[in-house]
Amino acid sequence: MELISQIPIALWIAGVLALYMAWAIGANDVANAMGTSVGSGALTVWGAILVAAIFEFAGAFFAGGHVTDTVRKGMLDISLIGRDQLIYGMLGSLAAAGTLLVVATRFGLPVSTTHAIVGAIVGFGVVSIGPEVVNWGKIGQIVLSWLTSPLLAGVIAFGIFQFTRAKVLDTKDPVVQIRKLGPVFFFLVFFIIGLVTLFKGLKPLKLDLNLTQALIGSTLLGFVGSGLGIFFIRRVQLGPEDPKHRFSRVEKIFVVLQILTACAIAFAHGSNDVANAIGPLAAISSAISGADLGGKASVSPWMLAIGGIGIIFGLATWGYRVMETVGKRITELTPSRGFAAQLAAATTIVVASRMGIPISTTHTLVGAVLGVGLARGISALDLRVVGKIIASWVATLPIAAGLSMFFYFFFKGLLAG
């Protein structure tokens, strides 16, 4: 009891709010990542929860980083901010971003958790110091990513699905074609899994590989995947079948490919986006301990555990709402369509990570689903749902900023005395 009484109340509040934020991330962002797999039938809801539980938690706990930026993404000039202001602001940011995500999830709207926490941090910076504390150039990059990430993912998904349809699904004998091209698909999936893991998932572990080494390692992994693909396809395609069942067998190959890609995205997501929940917590802990605010904030294992556990429970308890939107309401998905969307999203993440372009996993995945839908014609999309999603993206930053301003004064009034 004596030790507990020595822990500042602000850190207790921050821990609870970080868990709340992680829960909201699981309910919205992770559900979005798993939505295509559930919508296509590749995974059941509980299967998606199991996959996410393993790979999101592994990414968050083992590769979630031992340090994090004191102020997420360098949005604010930290030299202008005092310790008390940082504490109130980070508490307000967690409460604001988590609340926005909860409301968005209630309506089944997939929004960016990164944009939510960035908007919240900008909001408290403006209200505590003034607009001059904000790095508006960074804000401009994020606004630009609203267009670039879904557009790039959509174009790639459109191309992948058109190729799959022309070379496999719409041919006279799709079984023969999947025998020929299946190993190529497996190669691509394992190659991209390697790059996603190296460029995105293992960055916090400081695995310092140059581009050539990463490409060589991912290529070798691709050949391993190709060999596994040959083995798996032979097992699934045994025996004669009538055309109706042949097609379903072809889709079974894409089920496996889609699940593999979902695992890679889940691991990369857990390792990176857990910082949106525990970054402010680490910043508060550093401010309370008297550490340098301008440097990196150390992340303790208990913080990573809070992030990982919260994400899993968020998906399990409320994730079905966003999974329904992404997996079923935007456009009708099958395993082959879902595979095209997820491979495109993973490819976009790899390209953007390597080029240093800020993107949202949410925007990327939704853009990829839109690309697959457009490959079947504009009528295959529910434009009302698409319009609501885009409106929620545009509203994320200003709403998060406004909520953060309110919560900043709330926590200042609560703790200042």
Image: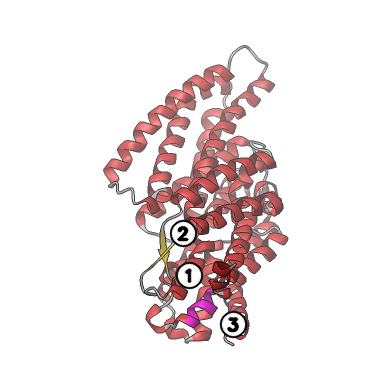
Q: Amino acid at mark 1?
A: Ser
Q: Which mark is residue 285?
A: 1
Image quarter of residue 107: bottom right
Residue 307 magenta-highlighted? no
- Helix, strand or loop at label 3? It is helix
- What residue is pinned by disc 3? 415
Marked residue nearer the N-terminal end (3 or 1) = 1
Q: Residue at x 51, y 74 (%)?
A: 121
Q: Position of residue 33 (x, y in %)?
A: 58, 49
Q: Dot 2, crowdedness within 10 Å: few (<14), some or many (≥20)?
A: some
Q: Indicate left or right for 383 with 266 as reference.
A: right
**Is residue 362 something that shows in the picture?**
no
- Helix, strand or loop at label 2? It is loop
Q: Amino acid at mark 3?
A: Leu
What secondary structure prevails in the magenta region?
Answer: helix
Front in this rendered view, residue 181 or 255 = 255
Q: Position of residue 69 (x, y in %)?
A: 41, 66
Q: Which mark is residue 69?
A: none
Q: Position of residue 248 (x, y in %)?
A: 65, 26
Q: Amino acid at mark 2?
A: Ser
Q: Position of residue 239 (x, y in %)?
A: 61, 12
On screen, 318 above or below 49? below
Marked residue nearer the N-terminal end (3 or 2) = 2
Location of the N terminus by quadrant is bottom right
Q: Which mark is residue 300?
A: 2
CB under 8 Å between discs 1 and 2: yes
- The magenta-colored residue range is 84-91
Q: Residue at x 50, y 40 (%)?
A: 160
Front in this rendered view, residue 22 or 130 = 22
